[in-house]
Image (spheres, rainbow, N blue to C red):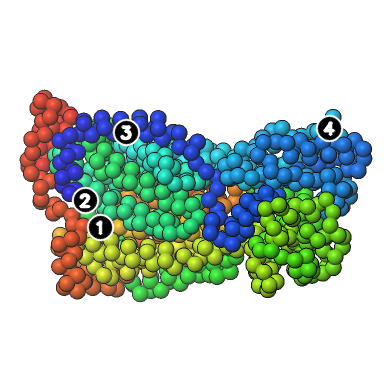
Amino acid sequence: MFSFLGHLAVRRRRALLVVTVVFVVAAGVIGGGVFDRLSTGGFLDPDSESSRAETYLDETFGAASPNVVLLVTAEGGDVDAPAAAAAGAELTEELAALDGVDAASSYWSLGSLAPLRSTDGSAALVLGVIGGSPDDVEVVVEAIDEELAGTYGDGAVTVAVGGQAEVFRQVGLTIEGDLARAESIAVPITMALLIVVFGGLVAALLPLGIGMVAVLGAFLVLWLVTSVADVSVFSINLVTALGLGLAIDYSLFVVSRFREELAAGRSTEAAVVRTVETAGRTVAFSGLTVAVSLSALLIFPLFFLRSFAYAGIGVILVAIITSVVSLPALLAVLGHRVDKGRLWKRRPAKPVGEGFWYRLAHAVMRRPLVVTVSVVAFLLFLGLPFFSVVFASPDHRVLPEGNPAREVSEQLETDFDSPEANAFPVVITEDVTDEQVDALATELSSHPDVARVDARTGHFIDGALLAGPDATTERFTAADAGEATWLSVVPTVEPASAEGEALVEDVRALDPGVDVLVGGGSAQQLDVKAAIFGLVPWAAAWIGIATFVLLFLMFGSLLVPLKALVLNLLSLSATFGAMVWVFQEGNGAGLLDFTATGLTDTTTPILMFCIAFGLSMDYEVFLLSRIKEEHDKGATNEESVALGLERTGRIVTAAALLLAVTFVAFASSGVTFIKLFGLGLALAVLMDATVVRATLVPALMKLAGDANWWAPAPLRRFQERFGLHEAPADGPSDEVVDLDEEGDGSIDGGSPDAQLEGDLATV
């Protein structure tokens, strides 16, 4: 197949380039509209108890947990002053009247309810409920911020917008700005590194151009996916990072192999075909392993995670096709002109067997056991902090200090005795008597982590009825609900905490004699963790089995795939341990400018694992394929390892560095979990491409000896028939073919004299 693609790239090079240009234009025009079709939601399991509680509450009672908070500060320092009270009442009515706001209440509308006033009396709260989808909520809260924030009531009060909806909107806005900044950082650095690697402008521009094509193509793929499924707006971060990174990596290998084949004396067309047969085959297979790893995200019920699978697989497929088809066609046109625009004279390559990587491989293989034990111990040591990981959902502290929404949340924590904005519902879905409601409310309010319980029968504190029904308790009944009802539980603990989760578990463990559903932030966090971690073993099994099968089909060995899986897990364990040590425990928080919370975002490690596992296997495949190529030529086990590392050492290191630059650029983000995402993936890539590839791979290959390529006879015959084989070096790529499609005596787009020189060199 790859021989065919190589010949196609040469014979139809101009037609393929025209098709590529048309595709890029279509992708830019159509795919550019994908941003208007992306969603900001997808973080909840739609079938969980908390989701069902919120849905029942909304459909039956027209109520929901407050998701927007207006912090109203009186100019004179007293929210009960006539001017401040009038402004507060007017503000509440105006908020309730806005389109998309289902309900609004405040300190003033609820009869000066004390928990809604700050301890010094200078500020009070207005609570709002915005219904609809996450996208609808974002639109409404943006309108609230534009219309109500700032001075209000002729300067009587100052209004600041906070709450879950505003925090989430601010996270999205911050990431949007961070993405533009990351691109402005990554692209120039990447270009500079490519110039250093290739030493010339033409060769350096090729990978960057392919990267741009991959990103635009992925936008088109996502645009198509949005027609049938929800896609998270946050997946765009992966499209940009992975699109630029992988496409540049893949085209880097293709261009380097093409130049290597030209330097070996092949004609342009022979070099193109041989490049596709070798580097193209490896690129396609490597991309497939990354896609398989990302496809595990499709198992999870959160479309936030599934969106990264759509985005990642889309950008990988486009990167593979452009690198294996479009780029070789362009190389066929350029020929030897790929080295045009050199900025300095190329140094003669060192003879085979004298390079740094060759010497390093033999040094490692002289003491393979010592190296293996030392490096494995080092990686396990780095991974130790992961045993203390505490998973939770992110809160306002992921935003940078000084963000208005974060400041509102922090003021709610410090200046108010009762966290009213953190109240969560306990929904009773069947007819229930007032006595049963009293019994449940009494039991709930007696919990040490509960400040107050509001129900249709009154307000309960410390296991006792504080006040009977009033205007504020009418929300717990509905004409269509019968005798069903719900209770509002105001906790004393943070929702995004282990204490918040424990409170929900205690409430769910109660036996009130009726069916209840618990909602709210802590319940959602608990349900998301259950949904994710319950499926993690299946996702890991899929990645492990599929990757093992693919590696076997490529290399025909049982031991090589097994070693690759083990090495990947070792590398990732060290990465995750380092990330917990930094981001959860706060080491380096001042340097990286984030607030450590003692928690780790639940979804980010899952994303990192699937992406980093695929990327780590990517470089493993590039190295192993070259080792196998040398072994098949007759080299000994040790020599094939050393030659394989020498052939790939410089280029794989450069590729890893380029990909790491793309990810490190996201460390400039003001959102903590984006920093974690970028730095974690950069560390995983660099660790695998250096420590693992340069030490553990040669050491283990030496220890295994000839068993590296062993497989039982039946499996060997199966692989020989159905495996992903590479064409031999003296195969069809060196045959003379009629490629004079231009009719000018040239077969590579260059002058006849230049082509003749290439042909003579081949002879």
Q: Which residue is drawn at 33% across and 46% down?
A: 317
Give the secondary structure at mark 2: helix
Disc nearer the start of the sequence (3/1): 3
- Circle nearer the N terminus (2, 1): 2
| Residue under label 4 | 153
Residue visible at 26% across and 44% down in the picture: 324
Where residue 593 sits in the image (x, y, percent)? 63, 49
Of badges 4 and 1, the one in the foreground is 4
Using the image, determine if residue 435 lies above or below residue 228: below
> Which mark is nearer the camera, 4 or 2?
4
Q: Which mark is drawn over residue 432?
A: none
Q: Tell me the crowding category of disc 4: few under 14, some 14 to 19, or many 20 or more residues within 10 angstroms, Cα based.
A: some
Compared to 717, does 736 lie above or below? above
- Look at 71% across and 52% down and name the residue there: 479
Taking depth in this image into account, of 283 and 546 the one nearest to the observer is 546
Residue 23 got which mark? 3
- Amino acid of disc 4: Gly
- Closest to the observer: 684 or 34? 34
Callouts 2 and 1 close, C-beta under 8 Å: yes
Q: How crowded is mark 2: few (under 14 residues within 10 Å), some or many (20 or more)?
A: many
- Residue that label 1 marks: 625
Residue 351 screen position, x and y as percent: 22, 52
Q: Mark 2 points at which residue?
A: 278
Callout 3: few (<14), some (14-19), or many (20+) C-alpha neighbours within 10 Å?
Answer: some
Comes first in the chain, label 4 or label 1: 4
Tell me the amino acid under the disc marked 2.
Thr
Q: What residue type is labelled 3?
A: Phe
Taking 146 as reference, is 227 above or below it?
below
